[in-house]
Structure formats: structure tokens, C-alpha cells
Image (spheres, rainbow, N blue to C red):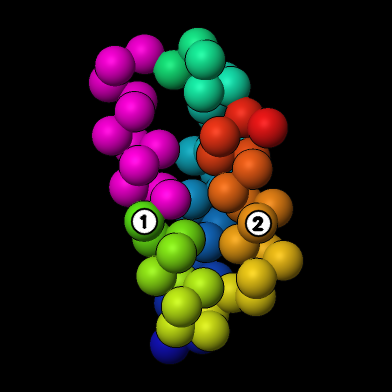
């Protein structure tokens, strides 16, 4: 399970790197960012990623 979540986290991180800051996200990408944030929260809640990892990935997703 941990390995599977690591792969998912890496895919999310890769997708986040391809996105601009939230202010420049087009209408089509908002759903993707929302989905990323939801998945990150689920992974944090399940213990697959730490709170620190969650916060770092969350900030990247939001372009902060």
C-alpha cells in the first residue's frame, strides 16, 4: 500500500510541477488541482504521507 501511495504521490507531484500558480490556472485545470488536493488529504489521513509532506505538496499544488 505504501509503495502504491508513493507512486500516486509522485504522479501528483509531477502534475503539480507542470501547473502554474493558482492565479494562472485555466478553468480546465481547477478540477485537476482540486482532485490533487483531495488525494493528498486522503493520503495524509491514511498515513501514507506525513503532515509535512502534505503541506509541501499542497503549497506546490496551489503555486505558493
Q: How far apart in space, not on screen, are marks 2 and 1 (Cα)? A: 13 Å
What residue is drawn where x is 68% and y is 64%? 53
Q: Is residue 10 magenta?
A: no
- Whether 5 is drawn above or below 62: the answer is below
Say the numbered circle drawn on residue 58: none
Q: Is residue 5 left or right of residue 17?
A: left
Residue at (49, 39) in percent of width and height: 15
Q: Secondary structure at mark 2?
A: helix
Residue range corresponding to the magenta coloring: 26-37
Circle 2 packing at 10 Å, graded few (<14), some (14-19), many (20+), is some
Crowdedness near tag 1: few (<14), some (14–19) or many (≥20) residues, C-alpha within 10 Å: few
Magenta part mainly helix, strand or loop?
A: helix
Which one is earlier in the sequence, the residue at label 2 or at label 1?
A: 1
Does residue 29 appear left or right of residue 8 in this picture?
A: left
Label at residue 55: 2
Q: Is residue 45 left or right of residue 63?
A: left
Look at the image and tell me whether residue 61 can be seen: yes
Quadrant containing the N terminus is bottom left
Residue 13 appears at what percent x and percent y? Answer: 57, 48
Residue appearing at x 62%, y 51% in the figure: 57
Asked if residue 33 lies in the magenta stretch, the reply is yes
Q: x, y percentage for residue 54? A: 61, 62
Q: Could you tell me residue 58's position as x and y percent? A: 58, 49
Residue 45, percent across and down? 46, 78
Q: Nearer the viewer, residue 56 or 8?
A: 56
Q: Taking 22 as reference, is 6 above or below it?
A: below
Look at the numbered disc 1 and give the secondary structure of its residue: helix
Q: State the image quarter where residue 60 is shown.
A: top right
| Residue positioned 35% across, 42% down in the render | 34
Assign the C terminus to one quadrant of the image: top right
- Residue bearing mark 1: 38
Amino acid at each position: 500500500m505504501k509503495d502504491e501511495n508513493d507512486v500516486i504521490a509522485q504522479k501528483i507531484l509531477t502534475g503539480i510541477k507542470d501547473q502554474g500558480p493558482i492565479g494562472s490556472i485555466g478553468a480546465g485545470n481547477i478540477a485537476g488541482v482540486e482532485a490533487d488536493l483531495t488525494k493528498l488529504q486522503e493520503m495524509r489521513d491514511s498515513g501514507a504521507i506525513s503532515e509535512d509532506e502534505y503541506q509541501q505538496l499542497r503549497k506546490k499544488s496551489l503555486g505558493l
